[in-house]
Structures are given as C-alpha cells and as structure tokens.
Image (cartoon, rainbow, N blue to C red):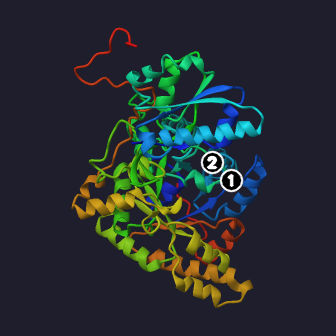
Amino acid sequence: MMKSGSNLEKILRAGHFAFTGELGPPRGAHAEEVRKKAAHLKGRVDAVNITDNQTAVVRMASWAASLILIQEGIEPNYQMVCRDRNRLAMQADILGASALGIRNMLCLSGDHCLFGDHPTAKGVFDLDSIQLIRMVKQLRDEGKFQGGAEVDGRPSIFIGAAANPFADPFEWRVQRLAKKVEAGVDFIQTQCIYNMAKFREFIRLANEEGLTEKVFILAGITPMKSLGMAKYMKTKVPGMDVPDEIITRLQGVARDKQAEEGIRIALEQIAELKEMKGVHGIHLMAIEWEHRVPEIAERAGMLPRPVVN
Amino acid sequence: MIVAKRKPFEEILQMIAGHRKVLIAGCGTCVAVCLAGGEKEVAVLAAEIDMARRLKNQPIELGQTTLERQCDREYLAQLDDRAASYEAIVSLACGVGIQFLAERFPTIPVYPGVDTCGLAVNQDVGWYEERCRSCGRCVLDRTGGICPVTLCAKGLYNGPCGGTNRGFCEIDPEQPCAWYAIYERLKGQGRLERIRAITPVQEWRDTVPRTLLQPGYRKPEKAKS
C-alpha cells in the first residue's frame, strides 16, 4: 500500500533497485549553488538526500534546499536531525514540508554539536531518531500529534532512517534496526560500506530476523576520492570501518589514478550489492563529488532510471 | 554529591571590584568534599584576594566563614547578625546554597565563587564524574543502572547511535559510550530484553522550577525564618 506516493516509494514498491544521491546545502544563501549541484543528479537518481546541518555545521535549511530541488524537478529526501529542534518544531516542519510537496524524510539523531562550527551550542535531543520515526508515523497514519491532538490534514511522508552496521556493538545493530522497523520506518539508508564481509553478515542477520521483508534497505556507498580520504575515514570518522585492503588498493596506484580506483571499488561493491538478497537499492553519497555521479551511475548500470506512475 | 569548580580568580576579583568589605562564605558539605568551597578553599581565596587588592593599592577587608550547609535555614541564621556589616558576600556553595544565602540577605549582593558542575561520584580525591541530571524520571531500571540522560552525550533513550567507536563516544575517545556500557551490562545479566522495547518520547519534568513535597508533609502557611 502506497504511503506517500513519492517517486522513491513507487520505485521500491515496483520492485526496482533504487538509487539515491546526496547533496549538502551551501554555507550561505545562494540558491544557485544548490541548483548547480542538483543538475548533476537530475535524472540519474530516484531521490536526493538533503543533509540537515551535517556534522553540526550550519548550512541552508534542509527543507529550503529540498524545495529548490522540487523546483528543479528532482525529488528530495528531506533529512531531519534531533539535535536542532524539539518536538514542536519538528512536527511543524514536517507538516510544512508535506504541504509544499516533500514526500521523503530521513530521521536521524544528528552529530553532536562538538563536531561543528558552534561547538558550545546546546543540543536539543528532545527525541531520538527512533522516537522521531514513531512520531512521523503517528502523524501520517493515525493523524495524531505526538501530544495526542488530531491533525487536520495528515502529512504524506515516506519515512526513512539510517543504520550503521559497523558501529559497536555489532550484535546490537540488527536489534536496533528491528527497533526502527517497529517504530514504523519504511526505508533505511546505511552508513558508508567499505567492509563488505561485515555488511554481508549484517544483511544475513537482518534477513534471518525477517527485517528485510518489512523495510527497504539502501546500501550506502561513498567512493574514495583519494588515499588521504580513505585514511581519514579509517582513523578519524567514528563508526566507520575501512578495511586495510581498501587502503592497500589505493596505495597500489599512482596518485592521479586514486580517484578512478576509488570509483572502481565502489562499482564492484554496487555490482555485488545488486545481487544481495535483502538489499533494495544503493544510496550514493558522493560527498562534494556530485559532478562524478552521472559517470558512476552510468558505469554502475543504473541508467536510465525507471519511471513508475 | 553536588560538585563545583572555583571560578577563575580574575572573574571573582572583577565581581567584587567596587567593594571594600566582603565576606567569603564557604559551605561545609558537598563543595567541601570536592575541594571547591570548604573552609580551606575559603582561606585560600581570601589570601589571594587580599594579595591582589594590596597590589592594586585597593585594600579590602575580608571576613571568612564556612557554614555547615548553605541550603538550610538553620545554618544561614548564623550569619544574621554579621551579614549586614559587609558590602557583599562571595559564596563558595553550590548554586542552591548561593541562592538561599542571597534570598536570606536580599539587600546584600551575593556573588558566586564557584561554577556548580553537577551531581557526581567521588572517583578519587579531586576526581569527580557526573552521574545524574536530576531529570525527575529515572530509567535506571531499564538501562542496567547506567544513566543515558547523563552519560550519553546526546541523551538518547534508544541508543547507541552510529557514532560509538570501540566502546567509546564519538565526542571523545576517552569518554565511554553509555549505550555500549548499557548493552554490555544487560547482556551480562541476561536482560537485553529491557532495551529491545522502544522507550517512548520522554515527558520532561525538569522544564519548570520544581517543588518537592514528600507524602504526609505540607507547606507551612508562611515559611518560618
């Protein structure tokens, strides 16, 4: 049964292998920057995640950049973090987003303020991501605000959330996914995958628990642009699991060939993920690399994107 | 206990810059144990202020006292005949004591000499770790006796988030991840089902000034002095 009518939902429900992209809004008020980045993604992905003050750095509002995408004829996946707003602001934004045509939403806890450009700001965390999922579901399916009052005009939102199969404790990760499913999530986009062995195990467990029949799982892929990036991801980014073999492969090619090698690794992963039972699509996070998405989409055999009416 | 940290000396000096006769009031309970505002710290602060003001050619007359507790009227009453002879009071009690003192002597400026830092355990002499935010809705039964409100940097009720890093928090490699610890403890006790269920949205109780009246007790018509 269709819940939001979003393009992403239609693609997934029709049984197609979904392909989503990502766009970080600018650190300023230039709509043109959003349009420029978005142009690379148009027609190449089913929906584009618009990050919400990612890494706790202030940027143009996620809902605003999402609306610019709609103007450009691209479907946004509106990200919302629990760090910056309480339940009143969240519900108000969700209603507004739906009213203006936003149909997908990704519910996240959000990086801690300490990481960002306002490290002494007070993090809100009135809700956590699981509670947020449940709140959106309640608004949409029961027509009730979190506080219990009736909603006059339910939002149409395809509810997404993240899963990190690589953070500790590994055994709990599938359980936490199960909690998100129980809360009412429709689709999951995973953290960037580099350790395929661990991801296979995660999906195996999720299949075993029957979770992959209840939720669409989009595997997160971020091509490495350079050896430096791989080393940074391996050592500096919490919850990221970059096996030595990735480092070794990038080390094994000339510096000016590292980006190509990174893309090749990503393409190999995508090829495997397409065949993996329980995986319903790819979420490509080409960070500040939007202009390479057309090529990656083409080489990954993702084009043309299916159209479902 | 309540723990506090003495404010930077320059900040205290700035607060009392215009005064020539000041009382430094310590508190003999929590802040004395955590080495921030007991008798000894009162003496140290007095000596520092005295020296600094002499160097500035602005000598100051300082009184010193340390009450058993500044959060109880019966001890504050001990200052009733002395307080008025001072232009100001610097209190080294926690925020509770400072306010109760200020309320007792409303015509005298009362300044904080410490920053109150929370409800903490005594790990060792001089080393304290926060354990409770006094949220008013204890969930320790569900979380293996480990507080997610205080010890999870995001205060998550359904953790751990994706930032847990080999058992530590994403904010600091030395800060244990509360939810990792909760998981490990409950697993050890065979009680993981406690966190398998979704903890619903919190009904916050610490959003307004709280008054606690124990069962069987009533507020007197007028607070006795």
Residue drawn at x 54%, y 38% as measured from the top left: B42
Say left or right for B127 vs A20.
Answer: left
Q: Nearer the viewer, residue A54 or B181?
A: B181
Q: Where residue A25 is drawn, which disc sits there?
A: 1
CA separation in Å, label 2 and label 1: 7 Å
**In the current view of this chain or complex, which residue is farthest to the top?**
B221
Under tag 2, what secondary structure? helix
Q: Amino acid at mark 2?
A: Ser
* Residue A142 quadrant: top left
Callout 2 touching callout 1 (CB < 8 Å): yes
Q: Do pointers 2 and 1 mark residues of a single chain?
A: yes
x, y percent for residue B206: 43, 33
x, y percent for residue B178: 40, 56
Determine the chain carrying the residue at label 2: A
Q: Residues within 10 Å of mark 2 (few under 14, many from 20)?
A: many
x, y percent for residue A51: 61, 54
Residue position for label 2: A62
